[in-house]
Image (spheres, rainbow, N blue to C red):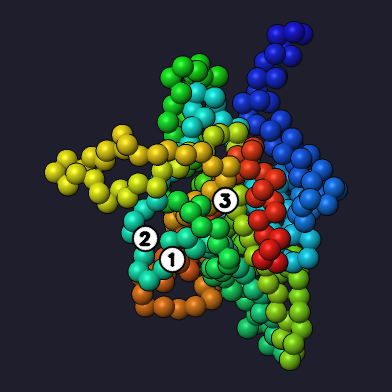
Amino acid sequence: MENINNKFEQQLNRHGYGFQYTVLELLKKLANEGRSNWLFEAAEFPVEVQGVGTQIDFILRYRTTQLFILAECKRVDPKFNNWCFVKAPYVRRNRNYESYFVDHVEYNYNEFFPENSCLITGEELITPVTEYRTYHIGFIVKSHNIKGESGKTENDAIEKATTQICRGLNGLIELLSKRPSLIKKEEKNNIINSGATFLPVIFTTAKIFTCDHDISLANIEDGKLDLYDEKIVTKDWILYQYHISPNIKHLCKPGQITNKFAEVLDQEYVRTIAIVSVEGINDFMKYFDSIF
């Protein structure tokens, strides 16, 4: 029995269930004490996008709006505990790199011509944006003096976590196209407009490090960077601009048509994912209070 107990404990820890529900318990406490306006909606919510199913760890709703957090909880192996991020000097034309892009969906229902009803999707730019928190490239740096738990590498943990939460996000949008009653309705001139905004968030036990070095200053002859004199700093949470792969993207109709590559990138593929360490949870949960 002791052996079963230990193995069961290891499995629960490795898959992060303890961390997931501890984060939820903390968020519940913050809401009950009036220190957060985020309310729990559901956990392990199943969705599907392009034939692949997954679960969203949990969904939160902002108290007075149709603003939702879709959360992925990532407990990392201590050996792969250092998540390091840097800014990209070039992303797209005529755009502030500190922008906070999230998905906004609207369901336009016409009671006279129901066949013309549809879910329209696109990006929404949240302002004001916290300066110096947006990063574009992330890698994991191993801790060589710490023994790993599983013997497996987690060098791709950032990519796996971002892919997972983006698959959940796009799966939920696919669900809304079939169940528009899930988002609030407002009737005007015989048209019922429904809208909701979704924020993907990764809560993690990892430590977050950032570097603001201009990586376009690499040696052009060998392509190498020199970060020896650069300052690496820790942050409680950051905004990670991620370019979603088409194979995990929803197939709903975009709200706007454009003939510019940069605008297509913004509207359909670039999404900002908040990556929040344990130390940053309290601060991040207050971030939207000044906006909404």
Q: Nearer the viewer, residue 288 or 271?
A: 288
At 41% across and 71% down in the image, what residue appears? Answer: 263
Looking at the image, which is closer to me, 95 or 111?
Answer: 95
Q: Residues within 10 Å of mark 2 (few under 14, many from 20)?
A: some
Q: Which mark is residue 91?
A: 2
Mark 2 is on which residue type? Val
The residue indicated by pointer 3 is 274
Q: Which mark is residue 111?
A: none
Image coords of residue 70 (percent x, y): 65, 52
Q: Are marks 2 and 1 in contact (CB under 8 Å)?
A: no
Please tell me how crowded label 3 is: few (under 14), some (14-19), or many (20+) other residues with Cα within 10 Å. many
Is 208 displayed left or right of 232 in the figure?
Answer: right
49 up-or-down from 225: above or below? below
Quarter location, residue 261: bottom left
Q: Decide: marks 3, 1 in contact (CB < 8 A)?
A: no
Label annotation for residue 96? 1
Q: How far is mark 2 from mark 3, CA to CA?
A: 18 Å
For the point 67% across and 44% down, the residue is 281
Q: Is residue 124 visible?
A: yes
Residue at 43% x, 61% y is 97
For badge 1, the amino acid type reads Asn
Image position, residue 59 (x, y; %): 71, 51
